[in-house]
Amino acid sequence: MTQLTETQARDMIAVVNTRNLDKIVEQYAENATFQVPNLDKPLKGREAIRAFMKDSFVAFPDWKIETRGIAVSGNESFVVNTVHGTHDGPLVGHDGTTIPATHKKFVQEQMTHVILNEHGKVLSLRAYGNPTELYYQLGLSTASPK
């Protein structure tokens, strides 16, 4: 089992904020799973993660994660974070349709659970948050999350 430190967890998040797809994907195991609040089911594998991140960076060119707190235990970390950005590019929906830019900002509070494999690569990433809140802020839903 790989022991993870808080500094290493913060460094992994800092890599995501660089938007360097090669470096981001390098952090994941080949068979990694990845799920964030707006995905109905987990993505599997590096290439699926790369494609999702690439599309996200196009849809939200200023997308960024801010860390609020991290708890580490063995090969697992729990990160309390805020994700924010502006919808300034096309967003690919769950059904493959493209949603034109709304030019609206969003802020989403999340808790992210990360598990590393024995080689120190991300085996599983699961972020928990409220996708309804995201869609409401972007003007894509009239249902208020509150």
Image (cartoon, grey):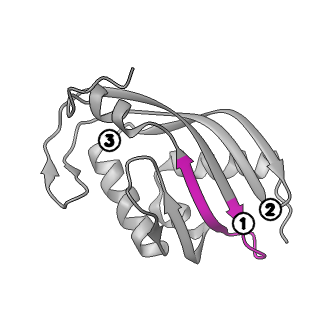
SS assignment at label 1: strand
Q: Which residue is mark 2?
A: 75
The alpha-carbon separation of the residues under discs 1 and 2 comes to 5 Å
Depicted 120 relative to depicted 133: above or below = below
Looking at marks 1 and 3 on the same chain, the residue that comes earlier in the sequence is marked by 3
For image coordinates 17% across by 38% down, the residue present is 101
Q: Nearer the viewer, mark 1 or mark 3?
A: 1
Q: Say whether marks 1 and 2 touch (CB < 8 Å).
A: yes
Looking at marks 2 and 3 on the same chain, the residue that comes earlier in the sequence is marked by 3
Report whether 98 appears left or right of 112.
Answer: left
Q: Position of residue 141 (x, y in %)?
A: 21, 32
The one of 110 and 50 positioned closer to us in this rendering: 110
Q: Any mark on residue 60, and which?
A: 3
Q: Position of residue 78 (x, y in %)?
A: 71, 46
User: Where are the magenta residues, as a range?
Assistant: 115-127
Report whether 34 appears left or right of 140.
Answer: right
The alpha-carbon separation of the residues under discs 2 and 3 comes to 30 Å
Q: Say whether marks 2 and 3 touch (CB < 8 Å).
A: no
Q: Position of residue 122 (x, y in %)?
A: 65, 66
The alpha-carbon separation of the residues under discs 1 and 3 comes to 27 Å
Q: Any mark on residue 16, and which?
A: none
Q: Amino acid at mark 3?
A: Phe
Report whether 95 appears left or right of 49.
Answer: left
